[in-house]
């Protein structure tokens, strides 16, 4: 379970980006975070993924306090940022091998029946990452992030700049991951992606508010 309480973050000149952020996510849930550009969504995900330090608060993963402990977070979290984390000059296989830290047997199992297989990367092992389509790069980014860990999958705008077919294939994988007991936390401007969320929070003025379960998603269109 993910339990965040009172997370705070300020930048230069005292600008408060996150103000006492609190929320939770249970195994088997997909939690969406929405809000206008620049409202702090990526800042929050970066803290959850351990790539940015918070000023204060509490963050527990399955009962363990992990805020600011990057190693502890890495044991639990697979993070897929918006920017491409791949080594584009390397092959699909070699990118996976990097993330598996040279553990070839584990990588082979991944390509046979793990996330890389489920995301359709089998058969593309020798292709250069830089020559892949945007959708295939996103799939490879997810598979790399999940290498060796990942009870919690955090994604920043997973469907950004992808065509409808790629979005649907990634959505199906996320549904399978969630149903397998994983936790998905994502930001999105895409109403189709938000439809698979168990719960949705809206971020405004540095704070999170949970939307009611029967809130009509189409009403979010003008607020994203």
Image: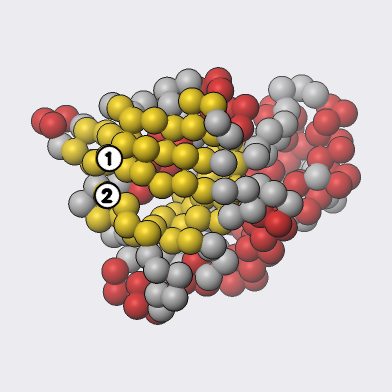
Give 83 or 77, whichever is nearer the viewer: 77
Measured as percent of width and height from the top left, residue 94 is found at: 74, 32
Residue at x 42% of width, y 23% of height: 68
Measured as percent of width and height from the top left, residue 46 is found at: 42, 37
Residue at x 52% of width, y 48% of height: 25
Left or right, 105 with respect to 14, comes to right
Report if residue 30 is visible in the image: yes
* Residue for badge 1: 20
Check contact, mark 1 vs mark 2: CB within 8 A: yes
* Residue for badge 2: 207
Q: Is residue 77 above or below residue 153?
A: above
Residue at x 71% of width, y 22% of height: 101
At mark 2, the secondary structure is strand
At mark 1, the secondary structure is strand
Residue lying furthest left in this view?
13
Q: Is residue 26 above or below residue 171?
A: above
Residue at x 49% of width, y 66% of height: 194
Q: Which mark is residue 43?
A: none
Q: How dense is the environment of label 1, judged by Cα within 10 Å: few (below 14), some, or many (20 and up)?
A: some
Give 190 or 201, whichever is nearer the viewer: 201
Measured as percent of width and height from the top left, residue 113 is found at: 86, 47
Dividing the picture into quarters, in which one does residue 179 lie? bottom right
Report if residue 51 is visible in the image: no
């Amino acid at each position: 379970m993910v339990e965040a309480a009172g997370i705070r973050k300020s930048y230069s000149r005292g600008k408060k980006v996150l103000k006492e952020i609190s929320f939770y996510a249970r195994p088997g849930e997909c939690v969406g975070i929405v809000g206008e550009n620049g409202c702090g969504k990526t800042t929050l995900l970066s803290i959850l993924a351990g790539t940015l330090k918070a000023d204060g608060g509490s963050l527990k993963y399955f009962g363990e306090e992990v805020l600011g402990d990057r190693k502890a977070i890495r044991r639990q979290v697979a993070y897929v940022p918006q920017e491409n984390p791949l080594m584009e000059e390397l092959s699909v296989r070699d990118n996976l091998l990097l993330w598996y830290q040279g553990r070839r047997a584990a990588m082979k199992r991944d390509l046979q029946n793990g996330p890389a297989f489920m995301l359709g990367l089998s058969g593309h092992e020798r292709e250069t990452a830089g020559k892949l389509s945007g959708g295939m790069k996103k799939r490879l980014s997810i598979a790399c992030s999940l290498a060796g860990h990942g009870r919690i999958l955090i994604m920043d705008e997973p469907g950004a700049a992808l065509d409808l077919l790629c979005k649907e294939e990634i959505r199906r994988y996320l549904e399978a991951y969630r149903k397998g007991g994983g936790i998905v936390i994502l930001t999105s401007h895409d109403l189709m992606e938000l439809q698979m969320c168990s719960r949705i929070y809206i971020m405004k003025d540095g704070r999170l508010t949970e939307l009611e379960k029967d809130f009509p998603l189409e009403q979010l269109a003008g607020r994203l």
